[in-house]
């Protein structure tokens, strides 16, 4: 079985993969030609090379894999070549739902890269609209992510599950988070639940507010979204709107539809206090008539509330309460990490960041970076590691984590730079030295791929169990000082 190497991308919307053969001999030349023809949409060349492979000792076009774990059909789907897909499935008999080594079907890849016509072709040939990728996402999740209303409608007509839940939520939550009202409307039309909570932390309504989409919020409310529903930490949609600038239209609409302005948050504050803390005077004016009087604010007026909330005494009390809450969540994140529940740990660390009012707790970002690495999300791991370095520039661990993220993203040059910086800060660290040995590109290190195996999947990466020896990486506990790597 010949193979080919794929060029990875670390962007949130990566280009389709490209492949080159790595094996030697005549078969490798034919395989390379087939893979390239599938990606380029060269129908005649696909047919000729497939016939040549079938007439030889090989298993035909269906048995050809690239080193990124994809077949010609999957590469054609990712690159938007519907005619090639039709030939491979209809004429050559390749199963329409054949999976890559990472578990992707051609339809999943077509949806991921917004290849609507190709996805339609695959659906016509019987592709499963409910197929799951390694993260539990369906083609409908990717249509929602890309704002592809046409594909979302087609998938739903073919039996896609509007309520399918992945680690990132339902398609409705994805569409609301990405501010795609057209897709939100289609999903609601097909029965998507506007009140379903994802990862015990947020609803579609909260997602629409966070994304700043008033149109999505209105659609969800009209469909029956609960305007008082809170998630993991009890934060209601009204609180979320009050904690952001420029959200007066959101606040007004929520109040009109029954949002309760007297439900406190986890620190005991009311929405009017949060709005005042963000100096949103217009929002305070709207909330003031419907908010119960707080006894500790003697001057119960719009100006009095703003003045009290921005006093040094009040800010100090909120800061202390926030520190306590942050440390509790940080400890919960550490416990989740020890259980290898990395998604729960990410949730806890993310929530804890909300209470890091000075944004100076570098360990929160290093901890979350480690969790992203464990589940193979290189871009998020890198972002957190870079934030950690900005907060604490002399900490070797932040550069070590950057190096690990760059390796995961296959950027060996930047990985070496980051790891060299980590080594300068902590020259005796054995893990940094080991990582440096494997930061050389594969061309200069033939044994590289045998030790660090990476397969590309959409915007994420699946990692071999031995990659980076991640088991040796541990987050910082809330009750300990930050250490080196």
Image (tube, rainbow, N blue to C red):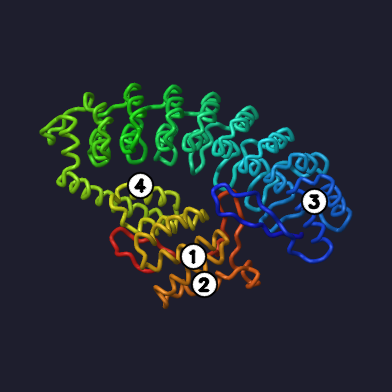
Which element is circle 3 on? helix
Q: Quadrant of the C terminus?
A: bottom left
Local SS, label 1:
helix
On residue 403, the disc is: 1
Q: CA distance from mark 3 to mark 1?
A: 38 Å
Image coordinates of residue 467 in percent, x first then y, are 55, 64
Say which label, 1 or 2, has the lower sequence index: 1
Give neighbour class at mark 3: few <14, some 14-19, many 20+ (Cα, 10 Å).
many
Q: Between marks 1 and 2, how big is the CA–CA gap?
A: 9 Å
Q: CA distance from mark 2 to mark 3?
A: 39 Å
Residue drawn at x 51%, y 72% as measured from the top left: 436
The answer to which quarter of the image holds residue 9 is: bottom right
Name the secondary structure under disc 4.
Answer: helix
Q: Which residue is mark 3?
A: 61
Question: Which label lies toward us, 2 or 4?
Answer: 2
> What residue would you read off at disc 2?
436
**Mark sitting earlier along the chain (3/1):** 3
| Residue at 81 percent of width and 48 percent of height | 46
């Amino acid at each position: 079985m010949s193979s080919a190497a794929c060029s990875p991308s670390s962007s949130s919307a990566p280009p389709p993969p490209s492949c080159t053969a790595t094996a030697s001999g005549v078969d490798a030349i034919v395989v390379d030609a087939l893979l390239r023809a599938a990606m380029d949409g060269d129908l005649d060349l696909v047919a000729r090379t497939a016939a040549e492979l079938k007439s030889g000792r090989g298993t035909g076009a269906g048995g050809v894999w690239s080193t990124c774990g994809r077949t010609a059909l999957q590469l054609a789907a990712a690159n938007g070549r519907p005619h090639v897909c039709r030939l491979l499935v209809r004429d050559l008999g390749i199963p329409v739902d054949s999976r890559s080594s990472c578990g992707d079907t051609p339809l999943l890849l077509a949806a991921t890269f917004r290849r609507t016509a190709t996805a339609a072709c695959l659906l016509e040939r019987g592709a499963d609209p409910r197929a799951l990728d390694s993260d539990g996402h369906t083609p409908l999740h990717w249509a929602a992510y890309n704002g592809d209303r046409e594909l979302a409608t087609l998938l739903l007509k073919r039996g896609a599950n509007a309520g399918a839940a992945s680690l990132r939520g339902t398609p409705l939550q994805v569409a609301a988070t990405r501010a795609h009202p057209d897709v939100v409307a289609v999903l609601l039309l097909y029965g998507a639940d506007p009140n379903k909570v994802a990862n015990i932390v947020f609803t579609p309504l909260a997602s629409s507010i966070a994304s700043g989409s008033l149109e999505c919020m209105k659609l969800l409310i009209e469909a029956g979204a609960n305007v008082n529903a809170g998630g993991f930490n009890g934060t209601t949609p009204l609180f979320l709107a009050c904690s952001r600038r420029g959200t007066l239209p959101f606040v007004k609409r929520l109040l009109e539809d029954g949002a309760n302005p007297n439900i406190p948050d986890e620190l005991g504050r009311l929405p009017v206090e949060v709005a005042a803390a963000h100096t949103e005077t217009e929002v305070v004016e709207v909330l003031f008539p419907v908010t119960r009087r707080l006894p500790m604010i003697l001057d119960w007026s719009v100006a009095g509330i703003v003045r009290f909330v921005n006093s040094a005494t009040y800010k100090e009390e909120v800061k202390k309460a926030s520190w306590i809450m942050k440390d509790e969540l940080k400890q919960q994140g550490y416990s989740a990490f020890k259980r290898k529940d990395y998604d729960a740990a990410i949730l806890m660390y993310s929530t804890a960041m909300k209470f890091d009012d000075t944004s100076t707790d570098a360990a929160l970002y290093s901890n979350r970076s480690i969790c992203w690495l464990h589940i193979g999300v290189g871009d998020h791991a890198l972002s957190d590691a870079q934030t950690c370095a900005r907060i604490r520039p002399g900490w070797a661990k932040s550069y070590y984590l950057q190096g690990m993220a760059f390796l995961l993203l296959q950027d060996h040059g930047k990985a070496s730079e980051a790891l060299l910086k980590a080594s300068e800060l902590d020259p005796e660290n054995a893990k940094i030295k080991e990582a440096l040995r494997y930061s050389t590109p594969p061309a200069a290190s033939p044994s590289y791929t045998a030790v660090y195996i990476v397969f590309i999947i959409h915007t994420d990466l699946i990692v071999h169990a031995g990659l980076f020896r991640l088991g040796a990486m541990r987050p910082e506990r809330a009750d300990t000082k930050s250490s080196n790597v």
